[in-house]
Image (cartoon, helix red, strand yellow):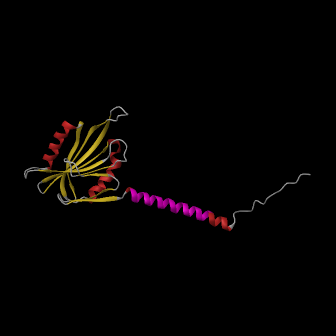
Amino acid sequence: MIFETFTSGNEGLSQKQRWATLFTIIAGIALLLFGLIMRGQIVNAEAQYSDTRIGLRLSYPHGWLLDTAADEYVFRVRNMTRPGFKTTIQISVRPVSAATTERNVADQLARTRALSLQDYRVLSISSTTLNDIPVQAMSYTYSDQNTSPFLQSFSTVVEGLDILTIQRGQAIIITFRAEASDFEEEYIHFEQFLNTLEF
């Protein structure tokens, strides 16, 4: 004789199990939202910088490497987490005569860089404004040679943008450079930087 055991198919989750399932789903969604908020705060975190000698105040992306100890610029930050060419924001200051215009500075920069940067090419030079201040914007590309002791030399195409203005008898050159393939993605950092810049 064979006996079969049947269980009722109508038995569902108990009230306690339903509440536990609902709580787990709500907790999972809450933790996901919390993680997204925390990531946004970390990605958009900023550090403050000021230089009273030339009257600069600004905010730059937190975690970028700050360098103010060079002769050719007064401020530079680099995103050292980027593979390949490190995205760079830099400010240089040069004394100029009263007759010098922003376009003169842009032309002089183009001539100088053509001699020092490989495959340097100016894409455009245009007049615009930055915080109601007239400026020249010059975009360009060049090839950056990276040499590693473990790899052969390879070349990376770098895209750059200079914003040039003359204030208090000095040319202020604000430079943004990134690997050409990442330029649009990294440009967000430069826009945030410009929004906080006071000079």
Magenta-drawn segment: 21-42
x, y percentage for residue 52?
19, 60
Residue 16 placement, left or right of 70:
right
Image point (53%, 61%), residue name? 29
Residue 130 vs 161, above or below: the answer is below
**Quick one: which residue is furthest to the bottom in this view?**
15
Label tally: 0
Image point (26%, 40%), residue name? 141
**Quick one: which residue is furthest to the right in this view?**
1
x, y percentage for residue 63?
35, 54
**Quick one: which residue is furthest to the top in this view?**
152
Residue 189 placement, left or right of 130:
right
In which quarter of the view is residue 10 placed? bottom right
Residue 36 belongs to magenta span: yes
Residue 120 vs 5, above or below: the answer is above
In which quarter of the view is residue 198 placed? bottom left
Instruction: Using the image as rendered, state which of residue 11 and residue 168 is in the foreground.
Output: 168
Quadrant where the image shows the C terminus: bottom left
Residue 73 belongs to magenta span: no
Residue 149 placement, left or right of 94:
right
**Main secondary structure along the magenta-highlighted residues:** helix
x, y percentage for residue 75?
24, 52
